[in-house]
Image (tube, rainbow, N blue to C red):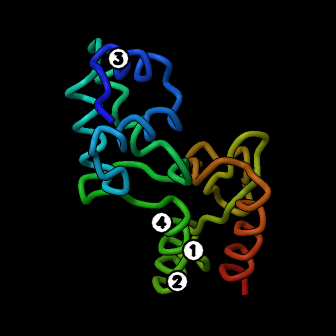
């Protein structure tokens, strides 16, 4: 089925990821390849604003909420937190003033000094505060404090 430019533009303007995936698939795009989907959205965007949102429309669908871009590619915040905990444990940071644990806040979970917790001026966001991340926080903190 051939889709018109008008139909594609209308669906892209809506921002509905399900409809975008459907129309891309009917246009012959391999939607499992998010890079080709992103390039297709950029090429068919009716405006620059939608072209700039192409990354969120293609990669933002699904379980990509905990991903961010770095110089080395896509990193998962959860994996980063686990790797950072292993790094601290291996270097012996938990026995020094440089050790950080995960502290649950209202909206986010932070890396902070165990004694200062939320008063730590050097705390940093690890990931959003969700039920799943709270379980992960308890597991990582148990690993760091034993």
Q: Residues within 10 Å of mark 3 (few under 14, many from 20)?
A: some
Q: Do the residues labelled 4 and 3 touch (CB within 8 Å)?
A: no
Name the residue tied to disc 2: 92
Residue at 73% x, 53% y is 117
Q: How crowded is mark 1: few (under 14 residues within 10 Å), some or many (20 or more)?
A: few
Mark 3–mark 2 distance (CA, rounded to whole Å): 55 Å
* Horizontal relation, residue 109 to residue 75: left or right: right
Q: Are marks 4 and 2 in contact (CB under 8 Å)?
A: no
Q: From what the image shows, is residue 48 above or below residue 66?
A: above
Q: Do the residues labelled 3 and 2 touch (CB within 8 Å)?
A: no
Asked which secondary structure carries label 1, the reply is loop
Res 55 → quadrant: top left
Q: Do the residues labelled 1 and 4 touch (CB within 8 Å)?
A: no
Query: Which comes before the other along the chain, label 4 or label 2?
Result: 4
Residue at 53% x, 76% y is 93
Asked which secondary structure carries label 2, the reply is loop
Residue at 34% x, 31% y is 54
Query: Which comes before the other along the chain, label 3 or label 2?
Result: 3
Res 133 → quadrant: bottom right
Query: Which comes before the other along the chain, label 4 or label 3?
Result: 3
Rendering coords of residue 61 (x, y %)? 50, 44
Mark 4–mark 2 distance (CA, rounded to whole Å): 18 Å
Asked which secondary structure carries label 3, the reply is helix
Q: Are marks 2 and 1 in contact (CB under 8 Å)?
A: yes
Mark 4–mark 3 distance (CA, rounded to whole Å): 38 Å
Name the residue tied to disc 3: 9
Badge number at residue 80: 4
């Amino acid at each position: 089925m051939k889709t018109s430019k008008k139909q594609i533009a209308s669906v892209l303007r809506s921002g509905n990821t399900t409809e975008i995936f459907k129309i891309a698939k009917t246009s012959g795009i391999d939607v499992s390849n998010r890079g080709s989907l992103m390039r297709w959205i950029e090429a068919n965007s009716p405006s620059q604003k939608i072209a700039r949102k192409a990354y969120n429309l293609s990669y933002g669908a699904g379980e990509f909420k905990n991903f961010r871009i770095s110089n080395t590619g896509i990193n998962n915040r959860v994996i980063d937190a686990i790797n950072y905990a292993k790094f601290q444990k291996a270097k012996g940071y938990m026995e020094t003033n440089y050790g950080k644990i995960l502290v649950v806040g209202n909206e986010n979970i932070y890396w902070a000094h165990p004694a200062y917790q939320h008063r730590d001026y050097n705390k940093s966001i690890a990931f959003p505060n969700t039920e799943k991340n709270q379980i992960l926080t308890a597991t990582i903190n148990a690993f760091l404090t034993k």
